[in-house]
Amino acid sequence: MNRRKPFVFLLCLLCLLILPVLPLLGAENGAGGALGAEGEEAHSVLGLELPVWSVIPFVGMLLSIAIFPLARPHWWEKHLLHVALFWSAVFLVPFAFGFGVGEAAFELLEIVLLDYLPFIVLLWGLFAVAGGIALTGTLAGSPRVNIVLLLIGTALASWVGTTGASMLLIRPVLRANKWREKKAHIVVFFIFLVSNIGGCLTPVGDPPLFLGFLRGVPFFWTMKLVPVLLFNVVLLLAAFFIMDTFFYKKELAAGRGPETTEAKEPLRIKGAHNLLFLGLIVFAVILNGIVTPLPFFSDQATGELHGIPIYAGIVLPFNSILQILLILLAGGLSVATTKKTYREMNHFTWGPILEVGCLFIGIFITMIPALAILNARGGELGLVNPWQFFWAAGALSSFLDNAPTYLVFMTTAGSLGAVEGLSTSVGVIAEQILLAVSAGAVFMGANTYIGNAPNFMVRSIAEENAVKMPSFFGYMGWSLCCLIPLFIIDTFVFFLR
């Protein structure tokens, strides 16, 4: 493993953030000057002026993510950053001509500094720290053991992230079931529960909820999804136990068994000190919300956040800077203090997080018009009931990335003009609607491999360990049979009230 790769990634990220700012810092009354006193009003009506076809780069970016990895995987690995930059330019260049360089710079800096930067730093920190923890020892892959491992992973997902929990548990699950011939179903249910559904309770759990947290949703508010989570986990584990028991008995009848594969070894955790760094990351996210009301971090009268002025009213808040620095510290200490052999035990590489970092910059930039249009015209979509938001957010999260999808429908919900509910930076949102958006984006990210970042990561690790995983459409067959009926039940039980 090349230890310089994560730092090269961070350096490139820093350059990406600084380069657009340099020509703007000296601008006073030029193109960007209009965004000073009257900038907020101009920004608020942007969604009314943008045509619907301005979302084409956003759609193109997401379709590229869906199609190219399947049609031309080797080409995609080499050119995914080029694709992200291409679609970003397809949006930014015409937008700058139509609305001015100043407005384009404002939109770019706002989305990159206030949304993308804290998002990708959190994901990087969880990925780096979790990759340094290795569980060794002998586990016998029986249905009961598998259920225990899935339960542990599901419980951890909301506290160390679906990415962190997936990276922690997938290799022990694979080792426990190494003796089995048929085990793809185990990985499929692992993706359902650990890589997606389990992350619904905190902003650390899944990127969509972290974006909601950045928009003013209290850290522990999503704990209101506990009944929905328990309901889904019980039904999925019941289905898994029946299925796994069937395959387990067939393995035993064929003469295969876990006790004959290798000498038993006690379970041990290598790199356990990384658990402290995971705790530091969770603390950093919680601290962000705790310090926000303090006088140093915000104006007590207006609620405006204090921070480093960037351009035309954009401020990088001190509370966000504090969180970013603590997460970078945790990830850096993990990289510096974890033995190389522990990461090698996990077959750890920096490739997945580099891919996510490159792709998400394109997603965040190209979704600017979609967010603006929905913020201004969201009430015209006809989405008014929780069940509609549950399925709309979920359907898009199945094929697009669930983080921007959540943000789109949260913005839509904020435009409905609710007078009672949760106050956020995008407006007051009825709590049942926001719960529906949260559940739809997090849960239905499990419907396809591209619905959530850990899905493909888990699939790749499984295939590296000689597990024959379903194809893209084969996996969708699993979700259509197992998840869609469950989500229909969720609709009647939780979201039709």
Image (spheres, helix red, strand yellow):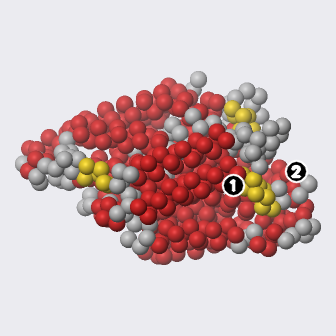
Q: Left or right: where does residue 482 sit relative to residue 184? A: right
The residue indicated by pointer 1 is: 114
Q: Nearer the viewer, residue 242 or 359?
A: 359
Horizontal side, residue 155 vs residue 308: left or right: left
**Mark 2 closeness class: few <14, some 14–19, many ≥20 residues within 10 Å:** few
Instruction: Please provide percent x and percent y for residue 180.
Output: 18, 51
Residue 275 x, y percent position in the rendering: 41, 48
Residue at 80% from the left image edge and 42% from the top image edge: 299
Residue 417 in the image: state x and y as whole percent.
77, 34
Residue 27 shows in this picture: yes
Q: Residue at x 66, y 54 (%)?
A: 321
Residue 440 falls in image quadrant? top right
Pick the front one: 144 or 279: 279
Residue under the image location 43 percent in, 70 percent down = 3
- In front: mark 1 or mark 2? 1
Number of the label disc, if any, that sits on residue 328:
none
Given the image, on which type of amino acid does mark 1 rest? Leu
Q: Secondary structure beneath disc 2?
A: helix
Please give the name of the residue rendered at 59% of the width and 23% of the height, measured from the top-left corner. 497
Q: Is residue 1 above or below residue 46?
A: below
Residue under numbered circle 2: 41
Distance between the alpha carbons at the discs numbered 1 and 2: 19 Å
